[in-house]
Image: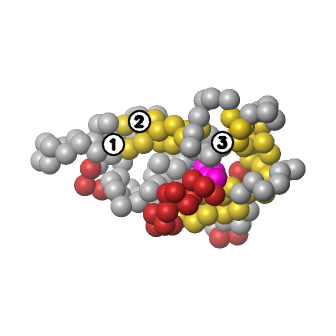
Amino acid sequence: MQVSLTNMERDVMTDETKESLTVYRLLPSLSEYQGLHPNGFDILRTMRWQRVGDEADRPTRLRAEWLGERSWSKSEFPSGSPSAPVLSRRLVESLGDGLLAAGSLVPVDIDGAKDDDYFLYLVEQVVDCLDLRRSSKPKTGSGEVKKPVYRPEALPAHLAAFRLPQFPRAVQ
């Protein structure tokens, strides 16, 4: 299984607990694997749903196409978009029901593909766990937080993923 875990932030230790928690962000492998490019309209609709929460914008499918050399293997985690993590059926099955506590799985329709079973992980849980004093200031307009620092007592360790109210378009 070719999935890279990149440490996003280590600064969640408190003096009271002396416990160190770490949040990771999944990134696609940088090896020679095909990646998925989501349909522009579908990704914009997904980001609008994440930002506003209107059920009319909630994705029911995601259209995409493979990118990369046809001779390359297809990745288990082929999308690097922070708004639209896409997972293979094999990855979904190996991660189990823990994924469903934070969201739902939406089928991905891949142009010209046969027997490619991939899902958009639509993370519904928005958790206010950012330490606003210690984190970088959210960018005006997008809300992107370049250096997030989480409050340990509010970090949802029971969830596989979550989104921040300050930057709801990105899955943490």
For badge 3, the amino acid type reads Ser
Residue 15 lies in quadrant: top left
SS label for mark 2: strand
Tags 2 and 1 in contact by the CB under 8 Å rule? yes
Cα separation between marks 2 and 3: 20 Å
In this view, the residue in front, 48 or 25, is 25
- The residue segment tinted magenta is 84-88
Residue at the limit of the structure toward the top, as seen here: 31
- Residue at numbered disc 3: 75
Which quadrant holds the N terminus?
A: top right
Q: Pick out the residue farthest to the right.
A: 112
The mark closer to the camera, 2 or 3, is 3
Magenta: main secondary structure equals: strand
Q: Horizontal and vertical percent for residue 160?
A: 44, 56
Q: Earlier in the sequence, mark 3 or mark 1?
A: 1
**From this viewpoint, is residue 130 visible?**
yes
What colour-coding does the image apply? secondary structure
The CA distance from mark 2 to mark 1 is 7 Å
Q: Which residue is mark 1?
A: 22
Q: What label does residue 30 carry, if any?
A: none
Q: Is residue 96 above or below residue 76?
A: below
Callout 3: few (<14), some (14-19), or many (20+) C-alpha neighbours within 10 Å? Answer: many
Q: Position of residue 79 (x, y in %)?
A: 65, 43
Query: Which of the two labelled residues, at mark 2 and mark 1, occupies the earlier sequence position?
Result: 2
Give the percent coordinates (x, y) of residue 35.
Answer: 70, 39
* Residue denoted by label 2: 7
Where on the picture, by quarter, is residue 60?
Answer: bottom right
- Left or right of 45: which side holds 17? left
